[in-house]
Amino acid sequence: PVAFAASLITPVAFAASLITPVAFAASLITPTLTTPTRRHCQPGRSPPAILSLDSGFRFCPDPAERAAPLAEIAEFEALALALPRFYHGQEPPQQYKRTLLAAADAVATRAGGPELVAANMTEPQLQRAFVVLSFLVHYYIWCEDGAAEQVLPRTIAAPYWHVAKALGCEPVYTDAVIMWNMVGAGGDSTADPDLIHLEFSWTQTESERWFSVIQGAVLRLLDPLMGRALLLREEILPQYTGGEGPGTAVDPAHAQAAADFCDDLASRLDDARL
């Protein structure tokens, strides 16, 4: 079952590994940027939506919490919706890059600077902006075969970095993008998979839609377990590793917590297969 789940999420981990230039570019600009206050998604839920900086798991927003198209980044949104045209070769990569730079200039001018683009966004708006910018940046870096961009222009990198940090994410294309990009009938992101569509897409193909929907369905099943997994990893397991050697008595409550977690994980993975 674990191998089954891993096989579903490996492509996203692989995709994330491809966009390390984004993190590299962000690292170049962080010395001159002020880190925004981190806002945890969906306050009051348990487990929290932001689990750790190295985790891509994020809650799907409730239908009522989905943000409408953002006037603040209207040019970015329009270009993100047009990505399939570029992906399928109807327009050349250099045209995409020029269009993105022009869009970034327009967005930054309206906001009073690229660092201020996300300054007044709500949590749902930040989630939407993160999806849009993740698509745009990922394609900017990889749209030319064999010629990956190593540094992002500041007018693109700064808004992306600020949006990501405000959400507690890293500025990379992660599972959060898939989770926040799925929309069901009536705006419900937890609807029947047959009725779910992707608001933004690389290819506008059925195969891409199904890949994302299946991945999202598995992530939704596993989300409730992530808080418990982190508790085991960060608070319980360290008590029994790295010591003087074997012989540490296991607290029965800890053993039961681990056993219950494994049972629930197996059950969730069985559900995922179905």
Image (tube, rainbow, N blue to C red):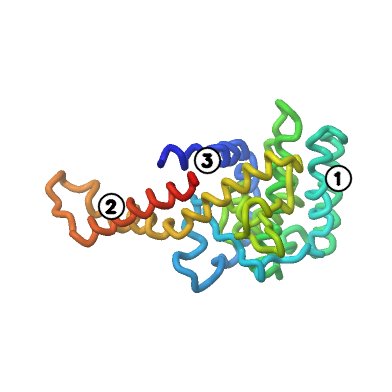
Left or right, residue 222 beside residue 23: left
* Residue 63 rendering spot, x and y as whole percentages: 66, 67
Q: From the image, which quarter does the N terminus lie in?
A: top left
- Who's the residue at 75% across and 65% down the image? 68
- Who's the residue at 70% across and 68% down the image? 121
- Who's the residue at 45% across and 65% down the image? 47
Please tell me the numbered disc located at residue 99. Answer: 1
Question: Residue tagged by mark 3?
Answer: 8
Left or right, residue 152 beside residue 165: right
Along the line of sight, the residue nearer the viewer: 134 or 186: 186
Callout 2, which amino acid?
Answer: Leu
* Residue 255 rendering spot, x and y as whole percentages: 23, 55
Of badges 2 and 3, nearer the viewer stands: 3
Q: Earlier in the sequence, mark 1 or mark 2?
A: 1
Quick one: which residue is furthest to the top in this view? 146
Please tell me the numbered disc located at residue 202. Answer: none
Callout 3, which amino acid?
Answer: Leu
Q: Residues within 10 Å of mark 3 (few under 14, many from 20)?
A: some
* Residue 197 rendering spot, x and y as whole percentages: 70, 52
Question: Residue tagged by mark 2?
Answer: 237
Q: Is residue 84 visible?
A: yes
Callout 1, which amino acid?
Answer: Thr
Residue 14, quarter of picture: top right
Q: Earlier in the sequence, mark 2 or mark 3?
A: 3
The count of marks equals 3
Of badges 3 and 1, nearer the viewer stands: 3
Q: Is residue 181 visible?
A: no
Element at label 2: helix
Quick one: which residue is furthest to the left in this view? 247
